C-alpha cells in the first residue's frame, strides 16, 4: 500500500491548534478583503490600471500584492526559485490547488486558462476574472478552440499566459500527462514556454493536506486550508523549453520532465491521468 493510500485510511490526529489559527487568520482575511477590495477595484479601473509604478503597471502591482497577501494569510511562506521570463511567455505548471493561481499571481500578473467553475467561486473568482482569466468549459471542443484563439491573441499582444496542462488538479505527489495541444498556442504566437514547478509543504515534500480531498468542494477546501499548519509555498521558475515548429508533443513532454525533476519525483515514465 502506498503512502497516499495510507494517509487516506489512517485517522488524522486531532489538531489542537486549528481553532487558534481560525481565530487569528479569519479576522485578518476579512480585514484584508474589506480594505483591499476597494483598492483592487480602483487599480483595475481602465483609467488607472496602466499608470506605471516603477517598471510595472499599477494594476499588475495590485494583483501581485493582493494575491501574495492571500497566500500568506493562509499560513504559507512564499519561496521563489529562479526568475520568471519577462514579456510575452507561456508559463506551464503542475496543478495542485486553487492557490496555484494566487501563488503565481504573487510573482507576476498573468492571464490564466482555467475551468469555467472558478468564475463562480467567491472572492477568488472575482479577482481571477478581473485579472484577465480565460475560462474554458471542460469537455467542450468548441470552447477549447475559442480558448486557444484567445491565448494566441493575448500572447501576440505581449501579455503572459499561464496554463495547467494536466487539465485538472492532482494529489501533488506526482505530475499528470501534459496535453500537447495547448503548446500549439506558443508556437503560433512564437513565444517561449517556461515550465513552473509548484509545491506546498516542508523540506521539499508536498503536504497531502493541501490538495482537494475526494469530492471536496471549493468552500470546504478553503475553510480547511485556512486552519492548516503553516508551511512553505514553493514556486520554481525553470529553464524555458525550446520551441520547435511541429514539435508540441516534445515540448509538452520536456516541460513535464523538467517539473518532475525540480520536484524530485524521479523518472515518471508513466504519468497518472489528469485529475478532476
Image (spheres, rainbow, N blue to C red):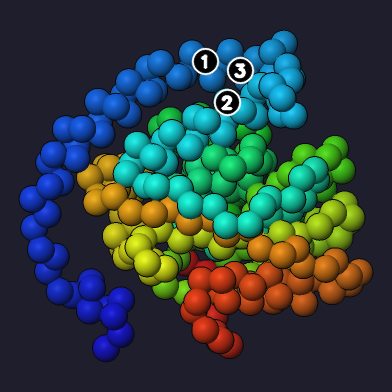
Dividing the picture into quarters, in which one does residue 157 lie?
top right
How many callouts does the rendering have? 3
Give the residue drawn at x 25%, y 50%.
228
CB under 8 Å between discs 1 and 2? yes
Give the residue drawn at x 37%, y 47%.
76
The residues tagged by marks 2 and 3 sit, at their Cα atoms, a distance apart of 7 Å
The residues tagged by marks 3 and 1 sit, at their Cα atoms, a distance apart of 6 Å
- The residue beneath circle 2 is 62
Q: Is residue 110 left or right of residue 98?
A: right
Q: Position of residue 218 (x, y in %)?
A: 36, 46
CB under 8 Å between discs 2 and 3? yes
Give the residue drawn at x 23%, y 72%.
8
Above or below, comparing residue 197 to residue 149 in the picture: below
Dividing the picture into quarters, in which one does residue 14 lie?
bottom left
**On residue 122, which mark appears?**
none
The residues tagged by marks 1 and 2 sit, at their Cα atoms, a distance apart of 8 Å
Give the residue drawn at x 87%, y 52%.
189
- The residue beneath circle 3 is 43
CB under 8 Å between discs 3 and 1? yes
Amino acid at each position: 500500500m502506498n503512502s497516499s493510500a495510507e494517509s487516506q485510511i489512517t485517522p488524522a490526529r486531532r489538531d489542537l491548534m486549528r481553532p487558534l489559527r481560525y481565530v487569528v487568520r479569519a479576522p485578518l482575511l476579512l480585514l484584508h478583503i474589506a480594505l483591499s477590495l476597494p483598492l483592487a477595484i480602483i487599480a483595475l479601473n481602465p483609467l488607472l490600471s496602466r499608470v506605471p509604478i516603477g517598471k510595472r503597471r499599477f494594476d499588475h502591482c495590485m494583483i501581485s500584492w493582493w494575491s501574495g497577501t492571500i497566500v500568506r494569510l493562509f499560513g504559507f511562506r512564499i519561496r521563489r526559485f529562479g526568475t520568471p521570463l519577462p514579456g510575452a511567455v507561456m508559463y506551464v505548471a503542475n496543478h495542485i490547488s486553487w492557490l496555484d493561481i494566487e501563488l503565481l499571481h504573487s510573482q507576476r500578473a498573468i492571464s490564466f486558462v482555467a475551468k469555467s467553475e472558478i468564475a463562480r467561486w467567491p472572492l477568488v473568482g472575482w479577482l481571477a476574472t478581473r485579472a484577465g482569466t480565460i475560462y474554458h468549459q471542460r469537455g467542450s471542443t468548441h470552447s477549447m478552440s475559442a480558448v486557444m484563439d484567445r491565448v494566441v491573441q493575448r500572447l501576440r499582444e505581449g501579455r503572459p499566459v499561464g496554463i495547467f496542462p494536466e487539465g485538472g488538479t492532482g494529489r501533488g505527489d506526482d505530475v499528470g500527462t501534459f496535453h500537447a495541444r495547448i503548446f500549439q498556442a506558443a508556437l503560433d504566437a512564437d513565444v517561449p514556454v517556461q515550465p513552473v514547478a509548484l509545491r506546498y509543504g516542508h523540506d521539499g515534500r508536498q503536504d497531502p493536506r493541501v490538495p482537494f480531498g475526494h469530492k471536496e468542494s471549493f468552500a470546504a477546501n478553503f475553510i480547511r486550508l485556512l486552519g492548516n499548519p503553516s508551511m512553505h509555498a514553493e514556486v520554481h521558475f525553470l529553464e524555458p523549453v525550446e520551441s520547435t515548429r511541429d514539435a508540441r508533443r516534445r515540448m509538452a513532454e520536456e516541460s513535464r520532465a523538467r517539473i518532475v525533476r525540480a520536484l524530485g519525483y524521479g523518472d515518471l515514465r508513466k504519468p497518472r491521468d489528469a485529475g478532476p
